[in-house]
Amino acid sequence: MQRHHTTTRHSEQPRRGAALVETAVCLPVLLLLTFGAIEASNAIVLKQTLTEISYETARFVTSQGSTKADALQRADEIIAARGLQNVTVDISPDVTVNTPPGTPITVTVSAAAASNSIGPQWYFKDATMAAQAVMVRL
């Protein structure tokens, strides 16, 4: 005995409408998550770069014969090479050629996250990233 199968074609219109609604609901969330992940990664890179700048500046300023002005010039070179904006570098205490060996020198580097962002400014609107390095004068 042979059975006959009848196939019924249902309209694809209701399914297409559901897919459109699902896309309209999910797409903004997915885009927000994607760009948020990109901005979070950029913030991590910014923090690491500020840490590098503070370390290199502290290493430079604590070497024999260097001054605060020399170290700030070195910091500016690194900042320019990285393409950062609105970065402040603070070295305390003031370092001169007469600063005695063994003096702890603190270098603090900070930058506005929004001005160094690659995406919309509202992810890290008022956030300021900072890094600090402390080394002893040689």
Image (cartoon, grey):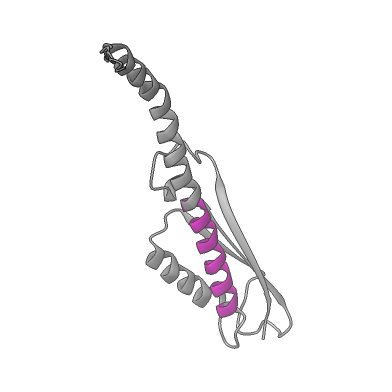
Does the magenta run of residues contain 103?
no
- The picture places residue 116, in percent across and down from the top left corner, at 43, 51
Q: Nearer the viewer, residue 106 or 42?
A: 42
Does the magenta run of residues contain 47?
yes
Residue 59, compared with residue 12, is above or below; it is below
Residue 42, compared with residue 93, is above or below; it is above
Q: Quadrant of the N terminus?
A: top left
At 42% from the left edge and 47% from the top edge, which residue is drawn? Answer: 117
- The picture places residue 67, in percent across and down from the top left corner, at 56, 79
The image quadrant of residue 58 is bottom right
- The picture places residue 52, in percent across and down from the top left corner, at 54, 68
Q: Nearer the viewer, residue 80 or 73?
A: 80
27 on left or right of 91: left
Q: Quadrant of the C terminus?
A: bottom right
At 57% from the left edge and 67% from the top edge, which residue is drawn? Answer: 54
Q: Nearer the viewer, residue 66 or 36?
A: 36
At 37% from the left edge and 22% from the top edge, which residue is drawn? Answer: 24
The count of marks equals: 0
Residue 1, compared with residue 33, is above or below; it is above
Q: Nearer the viewer, residue 28 or 82?
A: 28
- The picture places residue 90, in percent across and down from the top left corner, at 58, 63
Determine the main secondary structure of the stretch shown in magenta: helix
Instruction: List the single residue furthest toward the front.
Output: 1
50 on left or right of 31: right
Magenta stretch, residue numbers = 42-60
At 38% from the left edge and 60% from the top edge, which residue is drawn? Answer: 83
